[in-house]
Image (cartoon, rainbow, N blue to C red):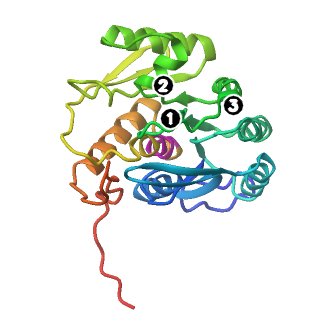
Amino acid sequence: MKDQNTGNPKYSPVVLTIAGSDACGGAGIQADLKTMMAFGVYGMSVITAVTAQNTCGVTAVENISGEMIGAQLQAVMEDIPPDAVKIGMLSTTEACQAVAECMKKYRPCHVVLDPVMVSTSGRRLLEPDAEQEMLRLFPMVELITPNIPEAEALTGVRMERPEDMEQAARLLHERYGCGVLIKGGHMQKAANDLLYDGQVHWYAAERIACHNTHGTGCTLSSAIASGLARGYSMEEAVHMAKQYVRGAMSTDLNLGQGNGPLHHGWNISSACVRI
């Protein structure tokens, strides 16, 4: 693979995460960068917010200014253009606007947006006046990855059956023109995900009996972006990402007193480093 700007060999695909920081390392940019390492891509990060959180919940959020977010984006884009971008927590109008300006100016090839609206513990992470600004980003991206509560909030469709998920995905696709992956982790009897890109693609899976669910959404969207950066199709990237997340959930990593983090390195062989 050649770098488009210099013609020099690029030793690894490059993926950028635009998201918040998680102090306990289970979600946000920390989860994203671990996932990117597991997928063999070079990870970069633009921080949109600093959160005080652990496996039990979020206790404080300090947002980064739109000006600083824009400066970070410019620094990255003008030096190391990414092959794919993952967008996560955008809690303010200014953050959404800074990212939108970046998307218009640099037009990255693959963009996956995880519409982070509410934390697993129930804390709202998107300011009410920022929601409309985030929606303006949807037509600029290749894929959005809402979970069931987020898809219900975005469409007004209550999802109790597979047909309801398909209806909501079609509505979002028709409204914004992007691919839609509705994550089924909130289903009671299964964990089936639905990808809609003009056609319906179901990814069926049984529920995993574990408490290691902190950062699953961040991890999945980063894994998809990494797969796209490596040249896989959207269907293939979603399949690989789902299998990776399920593996990371299944390792029984026993950390924290709440919803524990995933084991992001479960598929990396352990190595002995001599110092």
Q: From what the image shows, is residue 261 above or below residue 151? A: below
What's the CA distance linking mark 3 and mark 1?
A: 13 Å
Residue 226: within the magenta? Answer: yes
| Label 1 crowd (10 A; few <14 / some 14-19 / many >=20) | some
Residue 42, picture quadrant: bottom right
Disc 3 + disc 2, Cβ < 8 Å: no
Q: Mark 3 vs mark 2: which is more N-terminal? A: 3
Is residue 261 inside the magenta stretch?
Answer: no
- Marks 2/1: CA–CA distance: 8 Å
Residue highlighted by disc 1: 118
Question: Tag 2's secondary structure?
Answer: helix
Q: Nearer the viewer, mark 2 or mark 1?
A: 1
Q: Residues within 10 Å of mark 2 (few under 14, many from 20)?
A: some
- Tell me where residue 192 sits by quadrant: top left
Q: Secondary structure at mark 1?
A: loop
Vertical arrangement, residue 269 with respect to residue 239, above or below: below
What residue do we see at 33% from left, 52% from top?
A: 262
Left or right: 133 in relation to 19: right
Q: Which portion, as a residue range, is magenta?
A: 221-228
Q: Which residue is mark 3?
A: 130
Q: Earlier in the sequence, mark 2 or mark 1?
A: 1
Q: Quadrant of the N terminus?
A: bottom right
Q: Is residue 215 left or right of residue 69?
A: left
Residue at 46% x, 33% y: name it. 233
Q: Which mark is residue 150?
A: 2
